[in-house]
Each structure stands twice: as structure tokens, then as C-alpha cells.
Image (spheres, helix red, strand yellow):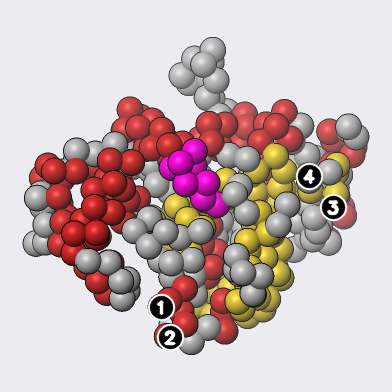
């Protein structure tokens, strides 16, 4: 499998009045061409920060990449060092190579512009050589792909659309310039269950029709069962486990992943029986020494409080950052 993106030793910090927020800490991750990779972790784990860094979209002056690099592998074999791209190249890179649907994006549609004009502007602003007719044809095709009634939606203003419809407009918009990699940050959060399901189905259609590579960011591990090829679990700014859906769901090798799985509702479990992980997510300014999960981990030993574990190979394609995975879960 060829990677489309290689994230190497990436660390990002925010400067805040209380101190440095270590939002992303030494992340090493390859994203393979054509796969759907889920990035899963609790709120505050650094998922959005990682996503934004991949497009060099961190807020200037507040956030700083303190280490590492992100390499984008182009179809023609060329490599782009994303964090070094300057304005002009970056502009050509975003939307066309990598596009992102931001967390809460559906609320950022311009309220006083018809969907038609907002979508056309994306094409026009990026100097795509399409006639007006071709551009609208493309827009209509994409709206149909996200299962919207194009005629109706195009002449609407955002307030005339439901949340789910607006989110589908955002997804269609992200595809306007035929990106190779699509990053979706919590695309179903804040939507009701039925609407969530519709969005997941739309993303399945897109996967089947466009064969895109996708990074799907969510706090909800259960969504991965439907769509993911691989899952990376993020805790306190680091990837603590990565593997295929099967490996993560049936053979987890990190106590945090195990905890997340226990809180995934099963069809048979009754409401109220869901377990959640005890304790609280860590303070990202004052992280504990050693394994960042140790204060919440029932399996901890001295080493866990002293030395931070790195990702170790469990089996092909499956890595965990836990000193004690063999003792706790056993070898395969
Ligand atoms: P997630 O998407 O997993 O919820 P984020 O990437 O949004 O996590 O945040 C990671 C950490 O960085 C959190 O502790 C958050 O409070 C902090 N953070 C995010 N944005 C900023 C910012 N603009 N200034 C300071 N801290 C921030
Ligand atoms: Mg987020």
C-alpha cells in the first residue's frame, strides 16, 4: 500500500495564558491511498489540531509546530512538504489535493448568499477552467451524490435547509475541486441519529464512487464500525493504538481503547448500562509523567508512571503504546 500522507514526529503547541498546551505530541502516522482512516479520541485529545495541521491551517501566532513534518505524496510521484508550503502553492494544494470539512462547518455557510453562489465561488476563486455551464453541471452532480435535490437546494439560503442538509452541502462543496484526500472533522456530531445515518450513507456512496482517501475524525468509536478501514486512537495528543477495524474492535491492545469499546452501545445493551472510562481527560498543559493514561488505568505499574510508552508492533498493521499489553491482553 502506498501512502498519500506521511506524518512524522509531529508536535504542535498552543500558547495560552496558562502555559503551553501540548495538543499534538510526536505523532507518527501514514495514511494509505484509498483507505478510510478514523481518528478517534475524547474531546480535547488533539484531533482537530492534527487535522488542521495537515492543511497548514493552524491559527498563526497562537499555534506552533514544534517538531516533525507532514509529507504529501502526489499522484505523479512528487512529494510536498506541507508545512513548508508558501501562500501560492498552499492555495493550489488546498481543495485540489486535500480538502477538509471542518468541525461545525455547516454553521459557517454565508447566511446571506444562496447555496448556488457559494458553491460557484469556490470553483471561480480557485481559477478552475470551467465554463459557467460546466461548473453548475459539476455542482448539480455533487449535490445529487450527497442525495440532495439540487434544484431546490441551489436556490436556497442556508436558513432554509436543515442541519443535515447543510452538512451535505459542505461535503459536496469539499469535493468541488476533486481532492484526493478528504478530511472530515466530526461530520455527524450535533446531528440527530437518523441524520447521522444519512450522512454515513452519503460517505459510503462517495467512497464507492470516487475512491477517495478519507480521514474521519470523531469522538464516537461506534461510527468506525460502519465505514473505517483503519482506526487510530488518540489520547492526550498522541496516537496510542492503531490497527484495522477488526484488530481494534476485537483485539484491542491498549487499556484506553478497551475503555472506549466498553462505552460503544451494543444493540443488546440497555441504556444506562453503558460504562465509561473512570476519571477525566488530562490537563494538556500539565500532563502527567510516563504514560498519559496511567492516572485512569487500572493496570498501571511503576513503569507506566515513569516512562512514556512508544508504539510497539503487536501484529501486522497493529501497534499499541502500552508497556503492559502482553500481560493485560496476551499475544495473538
Ligand atoms: P479535539 O479536536 O480532539 O477535541 P483539539 O485539537 O480541538 O481537540 O484541542 C486539543 C487541545 O488544544 C485542547 O486542550 C484544547 O483546549 C487546546 N486548544 C485548541 N485550540 C486552541 C487554541 N486556539 N488556543 C489554545 N488552546 C487550544
Ligand atoms: Mg475537535
Q: Residue furthest top?
A: 268
Q: Which of 212 and 104 is in front in this view?
A: 212
User: Under 8 Å from ligand 1: the CB of mark 1?
Assistant: no
Mark-to-mark CA distance, 3 and 1: 37 Å
Helix, strand or loop under label 3: strand
Q: Mark 4 points at which residue?
A: 318
Q: Nearer the viewer, residue 262 or 249?
A: 249
Q: Name the residue under label 2.
A: 87
Q: In which quarter of the image is residue 175?
A: bottom left
Label 3 crowding class (10 Å Cα cut-off): few <14, some 14-19, many 20+? Answer: some
Pointers 1 and 2 in contact (CB under 8 A)?
yes
Mark-to-mark CA distance, 3 and 4: 8 Å
Q: Nearer the viewer, residue 56 or 294?
A: 56
Q: Residue 108's spot in the image, x, y percent?
A: 25, 60
Q: Of the residues tagged 3 and 4, which is closer to the observer?
A: 4
**Residues rendered magenta in the picture:** 206-214
Helix, strand or loop under label 2: helix
Q: Name the residue under label 1.
A: 91
Point out the tag, 3 or 2, that comes first from the N-terminus. 2
Q: Residue 284's spot in the image, x, y percent?
A: 57, 64
Mark-to-mark CA distance, 4 and 2: 37 Å
User: Under 8 Å from ligand 1: the CB of mark 3?
Assistant: no
Q: Of the residues tagged 3 and 1, which is closer to the observer?
A: 1
Q: Which residue is drawn at 70% across and 32% down?
A: 246
Q: Which residue is drawn at 55% across and 52% down?
A: 213
Q: Residue at x 54, y 12 (%)?
A: 268
Q: Name the residue under label 3.
A: 312
Count of numbered labels shown in the rendering: 4
Amino acid at each position: 500500500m502506498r501512502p498519500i500522507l506521511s506524518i512524522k514526529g509531529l508536535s504542535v503547541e498552543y500558547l495560552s495564558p496558562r502555559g503551553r498546551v501540548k495538543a499534538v505530541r510526536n505523532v507518527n502516522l501514514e495514511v494509505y491511498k484509498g483507505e478510510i482512516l478514523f481518528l478517534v479520541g475524547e474531546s480535547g485529545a488533539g484531533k482537530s489540531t492534527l487535522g488542521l495541521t495537515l492543511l497548514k491551517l493552524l491559527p498563526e501566532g497562537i499555534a506552533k509546530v514544534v517538531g516533525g513534518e507532514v509529507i504529501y505524496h502526489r499522484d505523479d510521484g512528487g512529494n510536498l512538504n506541507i508545512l513548508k508550503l508558501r501562500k501560492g502553492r498552499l492555495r493550489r494544494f488546498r481543495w485540489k489535493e486535500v480538502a477538509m470539512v471542518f468541525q461545525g462547518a455547516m454553521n459557517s455557510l454565508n447566511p446571506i448568499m444562496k447555496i448556488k453562489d457559494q458553491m460557484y465561488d469556490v470553483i471561480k476563486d480557485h481559477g478552475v477552467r470551467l465554463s459557467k455551464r460546466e461548473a453548475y453541471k459539476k455542482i448539480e452532480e455533487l449535490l445529487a451524490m450527497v442525495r440532495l435535490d439540487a434544484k431546490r437546494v441551489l436556490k436556497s439560503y442556508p436558513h432554509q435547509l436543515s442541519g443535515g442538509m447543510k452538512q451535505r452541502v459542505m461535503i459536496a462543496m469539499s469535493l468541488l475541486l476533486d481532492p484526493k484526500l478528504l478530511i472530515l472533522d466530526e461530520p455527524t456530531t450535533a446531528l440527530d441519529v437518523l441524520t447521522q445515518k444519512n450522512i454515513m450513507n452519503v460517505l459510503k456512496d462517495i467512497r464507492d464512487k470516487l475512491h477517495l482517501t478519507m480521514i474521519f475524525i470523531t469522538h464516537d468509536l461506534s461510527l468506525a464500525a460502519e465505514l473505517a478501514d483503519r482506526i487510530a486512537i488518540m489520547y492526550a495528543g498522541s496516537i496510542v493504538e492503531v490497527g484495522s477495524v477488526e484488530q481494534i474492535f476485537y483485539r484491542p491492545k491498549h487499556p484506553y481503547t478497551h475503555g472506549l469499546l466498553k462505552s460503544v452501545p451494543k444493540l443488546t445493551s440497555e441504556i444506562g448500562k453503558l460504562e465509561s472510562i473512570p476519571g477525566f481527560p488530562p490537563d494538556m498543559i500539565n500532563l502527567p509523567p510516563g504514560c498519559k493514561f496511567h492516572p485512569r488505568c487500572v493496570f498501571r505499574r511503576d513503569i507506566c508512571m515513569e516512562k512514556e510508552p512508544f508504539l510497539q508492533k503487536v501484529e501486522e498493521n497493529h501497534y499499541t503504546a502500552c508497556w503492559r499489553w502482553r500481560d493485560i491482553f496476551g499475544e495473538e
